[in-house]
Amino acid sequence: MIASRRASDSPSSRKSSGRGGSFIFRSAAISQVRHQERLHGYWTQLMQSLLGNTTVTQTTPKVRAEKRQIELNVYLDQIVSEKVPELERQERRNFEKVQAITNRLLTVAWRGNRRCNAYFEDPGLATQVETYQALDVDTFDCRMFVKGFEIPGSFQPISGLNHDVPPGYAFFCVNERFTRGEKISVRTAWQDCIDGDGFLMPGAIYPFFAKAIKDALQYLQDKGDKDMKKVLMIETKPSLVLKILTDEKEEKEGEDKNNTTSKSKESDSDEEEEKEEKKELTVNIVIACKGYNWPQGATIQQPLPKQKPYCELGRQCLADIDDAMSDGASMWYLEARPVSLSKTLQNSRCHANVSRNPVKCSRLWKFCFAPVEDHFFKTICSFRGGVGAPATVIRVLQLMIANGEVQNSWKPLNQHVLRTLMFWQFKKHAAKIKTFPECFFMFLGLLQQCLQGMSCPHFLLPNLNIMESIDSSCANVMKQEIAKILESLEQDTTNLLIYTGIKQRDEEPDQEQGETVNQ
């Protein structure tokens, strides 16, 4: 060190150094100062540890962000391990209840009504995947399929604004390419279910469909069926809604016998069981037709980026869909659903013209791509070995909705809307999704953005904006709730446990949990 100092202080070195020498001197001085700062930091931490004070008084934004990330990881893991399985068990119980009641009701209706037997498939032969779809934990769709047409391609879907059909809907017309004899045979088979212009009308199928189910429900109730006495049927032409009252206390008895729980936990949950003793399940029974050839206007695309390494998984997904269609599987449906117009759709000329015309309303079928969406969702769930866990993200959001103060405003956000948002998130930002918290907060941000602009295209129908069906008042409430959630989580990450129902608002965070986060 002495020799080096003397060499640097010599006149020759000063003359030859110039600007370069001054730069070397400044960099050496800066490194020496940083070394002293590091030593000071080590001594400070050492003294704090000796004195028993491990609290850091000043933290950088980077350290705070890392700590926040660690806390969110811990809390999300706790939610996934404690509340998500409970939510899945509840949905499974609800589905088993719905399936048992609905299958029995539809079977009696199909056997007891001659026209229903002639035009609809046997409900007992349809697969569970085709028939049922969960929209929420306590809301389900049940499809009753019309019989397969004797002549392949008997009807063709007509969609698009040029045909004065609202986006997302279609008319089902007798195939124009058929010969006169073929058209006559199709009309003879379906008789008064087809109007004079050759359109298959849900409005004409609905009367005997509704009568068959109504008579079957009355028959089973008169027979003394206990489950059917808890069922209320509501007519929402051209579909039906069943309201099923359930007793959760009785349903949980079987599980409680198998599970060994402490008496303290049982006493704590007594009040909650009394509040949730009776619950209402909703089943939408919908007339549906199976579609086989890819409909005009629908654009198939993979739910991941086209760049490597994502394109391989996306191409495999599309190949699986093509193989299923070539094997005769139906990848989309046409469903008879009520035309519900929000304020945005009421201002649309196309929707207004159709809604004012009873004949056109009775012809409308709505597109449903549930089988394709199932393939897409499995693909993004298997992305990078399940990184991001999209299914779990939706479950956590469902928990937040269930524990929220304004649950009714969140009803429009069913499985279809949430899955569509998730498809777009992975399509555009797959490279940014590396952890579960990143996927969760990115999803909340995307949802907030779509509600702000009231715009999100359907993943397969480019001209359909799925946000237009949400009323503006509900959208405003959801925007405020999401902004409130994000702001509160920025201030205190333990609020995530409150929003998902793990911790009450007056509770303090557990000491053990705080120590785990600090470690």
Image: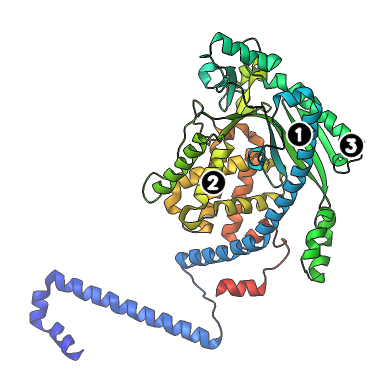
The residue tagged 2 is 377
Q: Which numbered disc covers residue 179?
A: none
The residue identified by callout 1 is 241
- Residue at x-position 49% and y-position 66%: 66
How far apart marks 1 and 3 lie (CA) works out to: 17 Å
| Relative vertical location of residue 365 with respect to residue 516 in this rendering, above or below | above
- Residue drawn at x 64%, y 75% is 512
Element marked by disc 1: strand
The amino acid type found where label 3 is placed reads: Gln
Q: How far across and down, in percent of the image, does residue 202 sit?
A: 68, 22
State the residue position of label 3: 221
Mark 1 near mark 3, Cβ–Cβ under 8 Å? no
Gap between marks 1 and 2 measured at Cα: 27 Å
Q: Residue at x 62, y 60 (%)?
A: 80
Q: With respect to residue 44, does 407 lie above or below?
A: above
Using the image, determine if residue 239 lies above or below residue 30.
Answer: above
Mark 1, other Cα within 10 Å: few <14 / some 14–19 / many ≥20: some
Quadrant of the image containing the N terminus: bottom left
Q: Residue 189 or 466: which is nearer the viewer?
A: 189
Colour pattern of the rendering? rainbow
Instruction: Out of 128 and 476, give the one closest to the viewer.
Output: 128
> In the image, is residue 360 above or below residue 29?
above
Q: Nearer the viewer, residue 472 or 229?
A: 229
Q: Looking at the figure, which quarter contains the C terminus?
A: bottom right
